[in-house]
Each structure stands twice: as C-alpha cells, then as structure tokens.
C-alpha cells in the first residue's frame, strides 16, 4: 500500500471546493475511459467540461457521472464478466451484484448522454426510462461484458462534493452507434481522441492524470485488458491518502 499525507492530497487538487463541517457521505459514480487503437498508439476519449459548470469548469475529463440505482433494472445484451463483478464487490463497503450492475450501467448511460456513444449490440430494446431513450430509438441493447474495471477513487472527506467513483474502460469497437452531434446533455462541450501521452498533458484533474498512468501501466503488461486485472483503489485512511490493489 502506497500513501501520502492529507496535506499532499490537498495540494493535488487545489481548485476543489473545501468545507470544514461533518464529512459528506460519498455517492456512487462511474466513469468510462473509451479507448481506440491507431497504429502503435492507444487513443483515449476525453471531453472538456462546460466553462459554466461550478465543478471543474473547463477541465478535460472522461464521460461519467452519478449512479442512479434504477439503472440496475435496465435489460442488457450481456452481464458483467464474473471477474469484474467480483472486483467491484471487493474492498471496503462491499456491494451487492445489483448495485455493481447499476454502477456499471451508469457508466454506459453517461457515455451516451455526454458523448453520444452507445455501447452495446444492435437489437430490440425497450424501457420507459427517459435517460435511456437513445438506446431505444437506435435499437441498441447495452453490453456489460465489454467493460473492464480499471480503478476506484473516493473523494477526501473535506470536499464539498464527494464521490465513490469506479473507473471502467472499453474499446471503441464496442460502440454500436456514434451520434454525430454528441450526447443530449451539455456537460461536455468538446470531444477529442488523444494519445495517452498527449492526454496526460491536457488540462485535466490530477486524479485523472493518476488514472491515466495506471491505465498506461496496465496496457503495457496486458494490451488486451483481460478480465480480472488488479484494480488500484485511492482513498483517505487515517489522514493518509492510500493506494491499495483490489
């Protein structure tokens, strides 16, 4: 287990809003790191957050957002790989298979909403949920077996917004439909595919840079991102920011 002090953590993201009251309970969130191969390079999809947002305005980030527990009831073309589901349940605050499913599906939904990319397989899909209507209209059944659990990070307790974020990865070939105009929300105002090395040089949050480093190291040892790989987990434990492996 690696660690750094709370003061070190505060220096990592000096722009994050702070508060001195009782710690806020972190909410489940999910992010999807979509990858594409171009020659010897691996490209990653990133989007610039709208300048008007109160949280990380103008920063380049991966598509993602808060988990809606109702996402667990969405039908899918395939389930999470058992090794990935087991990794999601590992660590402190063990979660149920239903909650793991909701977290994974929220990454798929947010990628549609923010980037206009529908991950899954062509087929008949029906739901009354408004935030999944893009999948209905384009006939795409979401797929979960293509997701790889890459990292987990919990926002430190003294932040105004706290998330327990699971970072997933998938390949561009797993996208069934790419909407030319992007997603239906205005969360991301610019979408770009960047080589991993260039992505690290962009205006990104420090935790995003750390996750890119982890991903690059994993790809170096496992270019196919096979199921069940080690998952780095970042959190504050007794005033020290720790990195442990799940």
Image (tube, rainbow, N blue to C red):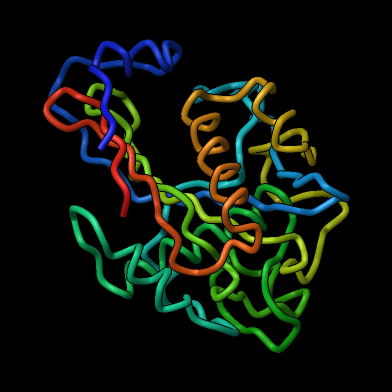
In this picture, residue 6 sits left or right of residue 144: left
What residue lies at 35% left-to-right and 64% top-to-bottom?
A: 87
Q: Is residue 212 above or below residue 18?
A: below
In this picture, residue 69 sits left or right of residue 45: left
**Residue in front for this viewpoint, 196 or 185:** 196
Q: Position of residue 44 (x, y in %)?
A: 71, 44
**Residue in front for this viewpoint, 163 or 241:** 241
What residue lies at 41% left-to-right and 59% top-to-bottom?
A: 68
What residue lies at 60% left-to-right and 84% top-to-bottom?
A: 77
In this picture, residue 235 sits left or right of residue 219: left
Indicate the quadrant containing the N terminus: top left, top right, bottom left or bottom right.
top left
Q: Position of residue 175 (x, y in %)?
A: 74, 66
Q: Position of residue 84 (x, y in %)?
A: 42, 69
Indicate the quadrant containing the C terminus: top left, top right, bottom left or bottom right.
bottom left
Q: Position of residue 81 (x, y in %)?
A: 47, 77
| Residue at the farthest front position | 221
Q: How many marks?
A: 0
| Residue at the farthest bottom position | 124
């Amino acid at each position: 287990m690696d660690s750094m002090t709370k003061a070190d953590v505060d220096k990592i993201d000096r722009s994050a809003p702070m508060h001195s009251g009782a710690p806020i309970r972190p909410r489940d969130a999910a992010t999807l790191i979509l990858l594409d191969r171009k020659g010897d390079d691996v490209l990653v999809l990133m989007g610039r957050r709208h300048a008007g947002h109160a949280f990380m305005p103008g920063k380049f980030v991966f598509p993602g957002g808060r988990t809606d527990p109702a996402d667990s009831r969405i039908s899918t073309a395939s389930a999470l790989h058992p090794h990935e589901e087991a990794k999601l349940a590992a660590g402190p605050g063990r979660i149920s298979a239903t909650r793991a499913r909701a977290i994974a599906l929220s990454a798929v939904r947010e990628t549609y909403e923010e980037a206009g990319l529908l991950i899954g397989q062509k087929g008949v899909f029906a739901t009354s949920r408004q935030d999944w209507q893009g999948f209905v209209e384009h006939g795409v059944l979401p797929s979960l077996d293509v997701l790889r659990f890459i990292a987990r990070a919990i926002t430190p307790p003294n932040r105004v917004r706290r998330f327990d974020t699971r970072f997933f990865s998938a390949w561009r070939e797993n996208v069934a439909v790419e909407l030319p105009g992007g997603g239906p929300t205005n969360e991301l105002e610019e979408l770009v595919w960047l080589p991993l090395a260039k992505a690290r040089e962009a205006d990104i949050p420090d935790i995003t840079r750390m996750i890119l480093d982890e991903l690059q190291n994993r790809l170096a040892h496992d270019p196919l991102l096979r199921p069940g790989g080690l998952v780095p987990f970042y959190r504050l434990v007794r005033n020290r920011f720790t990195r442990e492996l799940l």
